[in-house]
Image (cartoon, rainbow, N blue to C red):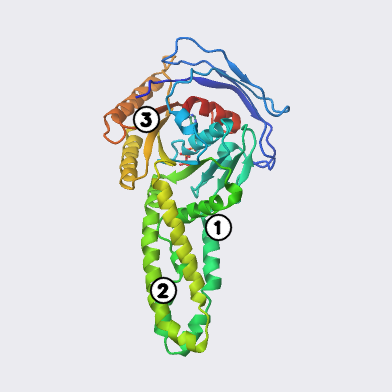
Amino acid sequence: MAKAVAWHASFTSYSSSSSSSPFPRNPIVPVGFSLSLSPRIHTLSSAFPSLSIKPKRPNSSFEVRSVAAPAEDIAGFDEMVSGTERKYYMLGGKGGVGKTSCAASLAVKFANNGHHTLVVSTDPAHSLSDSFAQDLTGGMLVPVEGPDFPLFALEINPDKAREEFRDATKNNGGTGVKEFMDGMGLGILVEQLGELKLGELLDTPPPGLDEAIAISKVMQFLESPQYNMFTRIVFDTAPTGHTLRLLSLPDFLDASIGKILKLRQKIASATSAIKSVFGQEETKQNAADKLERLRERMVKVRDLFRDADSTEFVIVTIPTVMAVSESSRLSASLKKENVPVKRLIVNQILPPSASDCKFCAVKRKDQMRALDVIQSDPELSSLKLIQSPLVDMEIRGVPALKFMGDIVWK
Ligand SMILES: Nc1ncnc2c1ncn2[C@@H]1O[C@H](COP(=O)(O)OP(=O)(O)OP(=O)(O)O)[C@@H](O)[C@H]1O
């Protein structure tokens, strides 16, 4: 179990020359803040020479003076960053615990360590744009400026992805077949065939289908050669419920699409004889082909989720008994789905209270109790525990994410 490290970081002043809109179109808001750290670090007796990072952009008025603890192998970052084979990191957990901040800070750290990195949000309630203080909307890859190596971000828009699938099937699931079959008095078959229209499946999607389509869209990106350069891909997933459905959905989709295709096959072969007489080409086949492609992609997604060599799910939580209990259930579910889990981040830990703040002392005692629960939890105690301190300002913009990454991902 990693030694507890607690930092007390206070941002002495924070001003940003932001434009009127919350997300200026220019790649990054020059963030003006200076950071003075007075670390109360349990495991270090003396501060370390402060590092000052020269601002990348001459007009940005920030200077970050941070005192870095020696590179203790707390998160096992050396293992995470080593090698040029592509690796995927999915961060998930209860709502509001800091998933996006941890995912974005990990992506910045990978990029600053030489990896072409893509950070993807599959959470319909995206907050990557907030975290990077940059407009990342639109469902396409957006370059993030600031890190040493290319870092791109993508906020997947499940509704948009779903629209694309629905339009594709509507065009191919044309009514040509329906009129023809009606004309042959085989309307009943069309009803059955009609019930299997992919569009309807998407109209009332089972929970998590959005996520699966979103991830399959990411696979689309990643399969195309122009994105081969990414060697680290970080997923900022939705809160626990969505994520669990997402992880179990490829199986569901594989099975259900498999059934749909089998049924279509039966109906199609029953009617192909008639059509061959009338020379009607099979328009339904295109929809079936799309279903087959979706099914194949889901199988790839499922295999990706379970590949211990290239994928890892990092659970993010906060030090409360409720959040720890939910994390334990999430860990058990991930294990059931054979999804590799090795690390647990406990975020927003209060530093020991220097003043006689009674509230702080009680709160921290409560947090320590939650940490004890982790130690005794059969699911969580085997994970590498990463403790992330509560800093007293929001983590927004690349400099702040770099600061958080230097504390958490060591
Ligand atoms: N260690 C920390 N210290 C201080 N603030 C933090 C820390 N971690 C996260 N925050 C802040 O907490 C808020 C929520 O963080 P974040 O959006 O990363 O959580 P999330 O789990 O992704 O939330 P959601 O479930 O809503 O997507 C943000 O304002 C973020 O800046």
Question: In front here: 320 or 158?
Answer: 158
* Corner quadrant of residue 366: top left
What's the CA distance linking mark 1 and mark 2?
A: 23 Å
The amino acid on which the numbered mark 1 sits, given as a three-letter code, is Lys
Residue 263 position, x and y percent, is 37, 73
Circles 3 and 2, Cβ within 8 Å, touching? The answer is no
- For the point 43% across and 83% down, the residue is 271
Mark toward the viewer: 3 or 1: 3
The amino acid on which the numbered mark 3 sits, given as a three-letter code, is Lys
What's the CA distance linking mark 3 and mark 1?
A: 37 Å
Q: Secondary structure at mark 3?
A: strand
Is residue 332 placed above or below 284 in the rendered structure? above
Residue 160, numbered circle: 1
Q: Which residue is mark 3?
A: 384
Determine whether the beta carbon of the residue marked 1 sits less than 8 angstroms from the nearest atom of ligand 1: no
Residue 140 visible in the displayed image:
no
Residue 93 position, x and y percent, is 40, 40
Is residue 392 placed above or below 160 in the rendered structure? above
Question: In front here: 336 or 50?
Answer: 336
What's the CA distance linking mark 3 and mark 2?
A: 48 Å
Q: Residues within 10 Å of mark 1 (few under 14, many from 20)?
A: some
Q: Secondary structure at mark 2?
A: helix
Q: Secondary structure at mark 1?
A: helix
Circles 1 and 2, Cβ within 8 Å, touching? The answer is no
The amino acid on which the numbered mark 2 sits, given as a three-letter code, is Glu
Q: In the picture provided, is 243 more to the left or to the right than 61?
A: left
User: Which mark is first along the chain, 2 or 1?
Assistant: 1
Mark toward the viewer: 3 or 2: 3
Q: Classify the position of the N terminus by image quarter.
A: top left
Which residue is at the far right?
A: 59
Q: Which residue is mark 2?
A: 195
